[in-house]
Image (tube, rainbow, N blue to C red):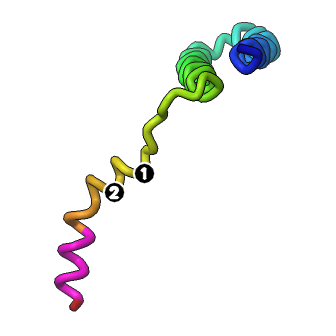
Amino acid sequence: MLGVAGTIVAAIMMIAFELPNLRKNKLTKELWVFSILMLIAVGLGIAQSLDLHIPNPLIGITYIFKPFSDFIYGFLK
């Protein structure tokens, strides 16, 4: 539970540091990107601190590119 609290406190500190500058300069697109990425990061941080299974993105990339890799390997063999 301490990890969840630490993640939330760190996120609040980052938001408090970045948000006023983004609003002052009227950077709305950057504010949206920052918010979305912060939401993803906090979600993954909380999931990891609770020892939940987080899938590895490399498995999906391997699944997508494996047929292409096999084709190139067979072509060069």
Residue type (three-letter) at the residue carrying disc 1: Leu
**Left or right of residue 35: residue 12:** right
Residue topped by disc 2: 62
Q: Nearer the viewer, residue 41 or 18?
A: 41
Q: Which mark, by number, is residue 39?
A: none
Quarter of the figure with the C terminus? bottom left
Q: Quadrant of the N terminus?
A: top right
Nearest the viewer among 2 and 68 is 2
Q: Residue at x 34, y 47 (%)?
A: 60
Most extreme residue toward the bottom, as rendered? 77
Q: Amino acid at mark 2?
A: Thr
Q: Nearer the viewer, residue 18 or 10?
A: 10
Residue at position x 52%, y 27% in the image: 52
Secondary structure found at label 1: helix
Name which residue lies at 63% across and 26% down: 45
The magenta segment is: 69-76
